């Protein structure tokens, strides 16, 4: 049995699913089409490849994955050895002289990393390239910007699954949604009390709810009459109810609450035993 | 509680308990009345491992018995976040002893629960580029148009599936954060709640817009569940994370809840409207209580008290109100599923 935080089993569950999903996507991204792993080498994989080369020697890379028991392609094994695992590689940080040499060679040769590495004993082309990109490339900012622009262009051209993002609308107090032109119910949900303490009449409410200047934020614009009948209309035209709620949050104003006329008194129904007694009433109303 | 004398309590002779070998979370009651009075119930395990179980039980309200159907138990990857039977009660789709069951979790899946076996019918993946789809927090089966299922995901989207053709009808970025629940109102109208703290309504006829009808008072307090009142579509109920409140919304008065039910003494975990009455809602939570509320036409000055209460003795995680037998409510807590007669 598991001991988890007792509350929010649901949130916990979502968290677990999210983690699993992340792992799945990560693993999926690290696979090529043929199903072999690509991407960063793990410590275990390095160990397997090293012991394989110790046993069989360098070369015959097409046999390496099978010999080492690795789910990697031969190219990946070869590069891992030549660029990282080979003990002749000098993994210390570049000296000032080496950096100077690298800069001068790059000016001469451009991005021809193996040629540059050939002049730097114990350094692999991959090392030189990585060092260049992490430490020296910043000095050639304009180039970098161009490259990035190209990448972004590439991204833009890839269009997967079309997903729509609806623009959310909110209501403000003077939203025309609340105007009775759009909402077709007889009694207001909350009776508005006016300054002199009397319950406002329908006409007053209508006035208070008309948006200022009739000019409303477009985000709060209701569906206009020329569009097809929208769902609200259907919903809101449900028979003018006698079962509606008054706003129960206006307790301090409860003396002004508009007592909907002829509310069927269901409070004395014994609901526990007879659930349907007023269901029939509701059926009639709806 | 001043009015506690008015409350009734569900007594133990009005309940039946099923003990599961594992903790339970998801639960569904079949609306299929073909084998009346027997009713099928599906329960999903909550085990923190890959392999989870879904068990099918037979409930007979006449002799208060719950019988597990071992031949109908099957494995489900990860705990299902939601279970739901096909909503159409007597459609031609429903063969006598066969039920369609949908589950959500790593994918949306459809299963056919037959007399003596369960068959996996289909698996729905909305990702075109990956063999995995973002995890689903919940889904809802459209009662009016049962070929439609809407799913909600942690990737902020809702996906509307045509399950007959097995294609995505629409995928919408519904919220700014994880979408936690989704509920259909009409055949083309659904609403969702999210970790961004909003309730939004969507109309498939106008996919360019959504309408925010409620936002949690403290910004970004997640909304966990959403229940649309099927008997009166103007009302919905939602619950906030770490809150003892059940928020009742009226879509005619957006932004301000029409009522807040605040008698739970700890966080609310589940809500369900009565299937045949527009005025009753049940809620259950970490205070171990299941409360049934009758929404009054006029509020008293001290808020609303529940009309019936039941204490399970454990934090209640799940709640379903039986559509086929509306005087029964099912709750799940710890390793148990319990049916209560109200």
Image (cartoon, rainbow, N blue to C red):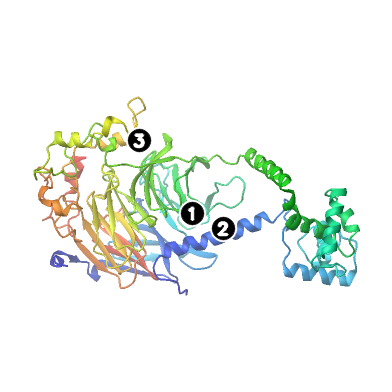
Say if labels 2 and 3 share a chain. yes
Can you say which quadrant of the picture contains the N terminus of chain B?
Answer: bottom left
Label 1–label 2 contact, CB within 8 A: yes
Say if labels 3 and 1 share a chain. no
Question: Closer to us: mark 2 or mark 3?
Answer: 3
Q: Residue B51 carries which label?
A: none
Q: How crowded is mark 2: few (under 14 residues within 10 Å), some or many (20 or more)?
A: some
> Mark 1: which secondary structure?
loop
Can you say which quadrant of the picture contains the C terminus of chain B?
Answer: bottom left
Q: Residue B155 in the image: state x and y as whole percent.
A: 51, 51
Q: Name the residue under label 2.
A: A21
- Asked whether residue B332 appears in the rendered view, the answer is yes
Seen at 58% across and 53% down, the residue is B132
Alpha carbon of mark 2 to alpha carbon of mark 3: how far?
A: 40 Å
Q: Residue B154 carries which label?
A: 1
Q: How crowded is mark 3: few (under 14 residues within 10 Å), some or many (20 or more)?
A: few
> Mark 3: which secondary structure?
loop
Chain under disc 2: A
> Mark 2: which secondary structure?
helix
Tell which circle, 2 or 3, labels the residue nearer the N-terminal end: 2
Label 3–label 1 contact, CB within 8 A: no
Q: Mark 3 points at which residue?
A: A217
Q: Nearer the viewer, residue B290 or A31?
A: A31
Alpha carbon of mark 3 to alpha carbon of mark 1: how far?
A: 31 Å
Among the 4 quarters of the image, the one containing residue B252: top left
Say if labels 1 and 2 share a chain. no
Chain under disc 1: B
- Asked whether residue B76 appears in the rendered view, the answer is no
Among the 4 quarters of the image, the one containing residue A80: bottom right
Q: Residue A102 in the image: state x and y as whole percent.
A: 84, 56
Among the 4 quarters of the image, the one containing residue A96: bottom right
């Amino acid at each position: 049995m598991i001991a988890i935080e007792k509350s929010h089993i649901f949130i916990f569950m979502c968290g677990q699913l999210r983690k699993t999903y992340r792992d799945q996507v990560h693993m999926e991204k690290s696979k090529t089409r043929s199903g072999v792993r690509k991407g960063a080498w793990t410590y275990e994989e390095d160990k397997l490849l090293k012991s394989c080369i110790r046993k069989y020697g360098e070369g015959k890379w097409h046999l390496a994955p099978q010999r080492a028991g690795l789910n990697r392609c031969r190219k990946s094994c070869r590069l891992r050895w030549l660029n990282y695992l080979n003990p002749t590689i000098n993994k210390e940080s570049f000296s000032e002289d080496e950096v100077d040499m690298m800069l001068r060679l790059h000016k001469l040769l451009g991005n021809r990393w193996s040629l540059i590495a050939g002049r730097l004993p114990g350094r692999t082309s991959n090392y030189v390239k990585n060092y260049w990109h992490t430490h020296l490339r910043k000095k050639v900012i304009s180039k970098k910007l161009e490259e990035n622009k190209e990448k972004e262009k590439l991204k833009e051209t890839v269009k997967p699954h079309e997903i729509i993002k609806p623009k959310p609308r909110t209501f403000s107090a003077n939203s025309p949604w609340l105007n009775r032109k759009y909402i077709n119910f007889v009694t207001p949900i909350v009776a508005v009390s006016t300054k002199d303490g009397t319950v406002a009449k329908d006409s007053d409410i209508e006035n208070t709810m008309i948006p200022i200047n009739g000019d409303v934020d477009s985000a709060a614009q209701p569906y206009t009459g020329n569009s097809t009948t929208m769902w609200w209309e259907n919903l809101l035209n449900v028979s003018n109810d006698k079962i509606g709620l008054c706003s129960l949050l206006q307790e301090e104003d409860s003396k002004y609450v508009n007592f909907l006329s002829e509310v069927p008194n269901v409070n004395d129904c014994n609901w526990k035993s007879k659930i349907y007694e007023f269901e029939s009433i509701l059926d009639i109303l709806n | 509680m001043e009015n506690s004398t008015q409350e009734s309590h569900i007594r133990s002779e009005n309940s039946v308990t099923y003990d599961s070998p594992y903790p339970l979370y998801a639960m569904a009651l079949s609306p299929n009345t073909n084998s009346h009075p027997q009713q099928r119930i599906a329960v999903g395990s909550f085990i923190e491992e890959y392999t989870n179980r879904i068990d099918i039980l037979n409930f007979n309200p006449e002799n208060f018995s719950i019988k597990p159907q071992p031949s109908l138990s099957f494995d489900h990857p990860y705990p299902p976040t939601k279970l739901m039977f096909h909503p159409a009660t007597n459609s031609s789709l429903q063969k006598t002893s066969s039920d369609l069951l949908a589950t959500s979790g790593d994918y949306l899946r459809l299963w056919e629960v037959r007399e003596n076996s369960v068959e996996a019918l289909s698996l729905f993946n909305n990702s075109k580029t990956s063999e995995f789809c973002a995890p689903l927090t919940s889904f809802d089966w459209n009662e009016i148009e049962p070929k439609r299922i809407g799913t909600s995901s942690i990737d902020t989207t809702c996906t509307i599936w045509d399950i007959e053709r097995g294609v995505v009808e629409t995928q919408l970025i519904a919220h700014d954060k994880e979408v936690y629940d989704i509920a259909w109102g009409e055949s083309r109208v659904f609403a969702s709640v999210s970790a961004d703290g909003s309730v939004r309504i969507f109309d498939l006829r106008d996919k360019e817009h959504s309408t925010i009808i409620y936002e949690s008072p403290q910004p970004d307090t997640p909304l966990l569940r959403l229940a649309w009142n099927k008997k009166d579509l103007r009302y919905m109920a939602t619950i906030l994370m770490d809150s003892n409140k059940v928020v009742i919304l009226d879509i005619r008065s957006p932004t301000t809840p029409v009522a807040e039910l605040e008698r739970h003494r700890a966080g609310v975990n589940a809500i369900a409207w009565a299937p045949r009455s527009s005025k009753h809602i049940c809620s259950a939570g970490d205070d171990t209580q299941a409360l049934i509320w009758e929404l009054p036409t006029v509020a008293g000055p001290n808020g609303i008290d529940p009309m019936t209460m039941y204490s399970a003795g454990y934090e209640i995680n799940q709640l379903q109100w039986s559509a086929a037998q509306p005087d029964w409510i099912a709750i799940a807590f710890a390793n148990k599923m319990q049916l209560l007669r109200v």
